[in-house]
Image (tube, helix red, strand yellow):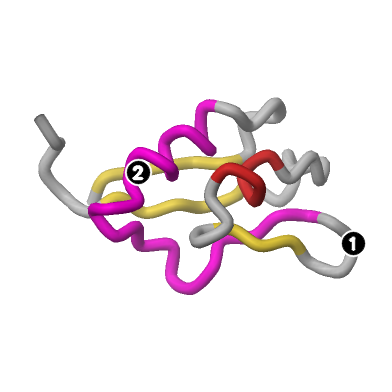
Amino acid sequence: MREKGTLRLSIDSARCQGHNRCCALAPELFDADELGFAHVKGSGLVPAALEEKALLATRNCPEYAVRAKRE
């Protein structure tokens, strides 16, 4: 059962070390800058169809820089 509320992603830039697992796992939601550090595409709101990918990327960040929050 899906939780209520929209999922929003963010990245703690102080924690991100550029492993880019999030970009590899969910390229629809993440991108990397010219130095290789990840950032969220767009506003960070996750379409329902991409929630599983978003949560997988969150769980796979070795630095715990990727955050997912229900709004």
Q: What residue is shown at x 43% (from left), y 42% (from top)? A: 53
In percent of width and height, residue 33 lies at 78, 66
**Residue 23 placement, left or right of 59:** right
| Residue at horizontal 43 percent and vertical 62 percent from the top | 44
- Which labelled disc corresponds to residue 35? 1
Pointer 2: what residue? 69
Q: What amino acid type is highlighted by mark number 1?
A: Leu
Looking at the image, the residue that sits furthest to the right is: 35
Residue 53, relative to residue 6: is it above or below? above
In which quadrant will I find the N terminus?
Answer: top left
- Relative to residue 25, is residue 48 drawn left or right? left
Q: Is residue 67 magenta?
A: no
Residue 47, disc: none
Q: Position of residue 70 (x, y in %)?
A: 26, 45
Q: Earlier in the sequence, mark 2 or mark 1?
A: 1
Q: Secondary structure at mark 2?
A: strand
Residue 63's x, y, as percent? 70, 29
Foreground mark, 2 or 1, reads 1
Say if 13 sits above or below 17 in the image.
below
Q: Residue furthest bottom?
A: 42
**Whole-Å distance between the Cαs marked 2 and 1?**
26 Å
Q: Quadrant of residue 16?
A: top right
Left or right of 61: which side holds 28? left
Part of the protein shown in magenta = 37-59
